[in-house]
Amino acid sequence: MMTNQEGYFGIFGGSFVPPELKAVLDNLANKFEKYKNDPDFNQEFKETLKEYVGRENPLTYASRLTKEFNGPKIYLKREDLNHTGAHKINNVVGQILLAKRMGAHRIIAETSAGQHGVATATACAMFGMDCTIYMGKLDTERQALNVFRMELLGAKVIPVEKGQGRLKDAVDVALADLVENYESTFYLLGSAVGPHPFPSMVKHFQSIISEESKKQILEQEGNLPAAVLAVVGGGSNAIGSFAHYIDEPSVRLIGAEPEEAATMAKGAPAEIHGFKTLVLQDENGEPAPTYSIAAGLDYPGIGPEHSYLKETGRAEYYTVSKEEVLEAFKLLSSKEGIIPALESAHAIALAKKLAPQFNKEESIIITISGRGDKDVVHVHDLLKNG
Ligand SMILES: *Cc1c(COP(=O)(O)O)cnc(C)c1O
């Protein structure tokens, strides 16, 4: 990839942070470079994914969905079957192993919907790491059950009242903690966003998705898929699903995003949270408020490599509506017996729209980023109240 020392993807990425933080992140970048090719490190990563997360997960041929779409053969990459029910744990395990190698005994993270916080608290419990989760005060009220989950798992959850009590404020407080306590503390970022080296690091750990799916599709079909589809929030499950196909020009890389947080469709280059990417902006150039029925997609920016893949035309991104997502949620449940996360239902909805572009001999892979148990009550309310 076109990433240089400073972590640029074309004009996107980089690191726009104060000097104290820059020093901490430079050290992190060096350690990541050192360990990502270290055989012992990689063996421990793979072993933990196998024994604790339950990898490799299947690439499931969805015969009834294939019939329904009347187009390409549909394969589902089953991140929903991981321990904790989504892809986020892959990255959390990788970063905690790196933290241990760096001598940190304390993990901090921020979370808004709580999914990244729960994955982090889970793996911290398993590795015996001290865990502090920062969360906007408003978010702790809306996600009381996830706060309880994190506390059960032994984490300390700190409600952030400063500013508007939202994700942005929790990020600021977490970064201040990191700068103050960098010798003992590792800041665990949950998506392929943020200043260098986070986007490259998160991609590296999530690339396990396409490392497995490529091997599996070659075993099952004997050739590469015509396309790989995934939903993009910050972009971590999508970049991990794309990674091993980026240099295979015959494979279309396709991202789905919600109409209400259409960063790729409507965003413009800007700086957000210490890096440059496409950002949804209001008329004053400030990050625009977003709303998505899937909490994990509520973010006005996107990982810098996705902005680059879009601008260079290597990947394509399309929006789907709330109605299409709810339809897809019901469809996968009733046709395949798999209740997907609302986030993942975006990818199914997009596959349905694009299916006529493929022929029946071709196959496509859709990443099911997570399971939908967490969303069933919400969907029930949405369908009841319209
Ligand atoms: C968090 C989450 C997402 C969105 O995050 P990405 O970094 O874009 O992958 C998608 N699906 C599920 C199930 C999630 O928990």
Image (tube, rainbow, N blue to C red):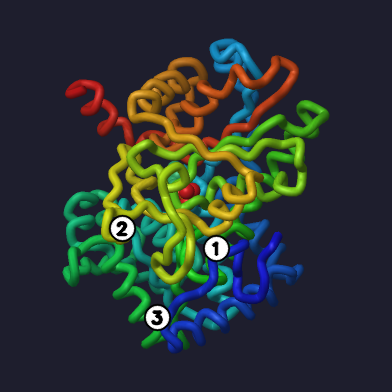
Q: Is residue 146 above or below residue 131?
A: above
Q: Nearer the viewer, mark 3 or mark 1?
A: 1
Distance between the alpha carbons at the discs numbered 3 and 1: 24 Å
Query: Who's the residue at 57% across and 83% down the image?
Result: 27
Query: Who's the residue at 54% across and 66% down the image?
Result: 13
- Dot 2 lies on which element? helix
- Dot 3 lies on which element? helix
Cβ atoms at labels 3 and 1 below 8 Å apart: no
Question: Which of pointers 3 and 1 lies earlier in the amino acid sequence?
Answer: 1
Residue highlighted by disc 3: 178
Q: Is residue 46 above or below residue 34?
A: above
Asked whether residue 286 appears in the rendered view, the answer is: yes
- Badge number at residue 12: 1
Query: Residue 371 in the image: x percent, y percent?
Result: 44, 36
Question: Which of pointers 3 and 2 lies earlier in the amino acid sequence?
Answer: 2
Residue highlighted by disc 2: 152
Amino acid type indicated by mark 2: Leu
Query: Who's the residue at 19% across and 62% down the image?
Result: 137
- Dot 1 lies on which element? strand
Distance between the alpha carbons at the discs numbered 1 and 2: 39 Å
Amino acid type indicated by mark 1: Phe
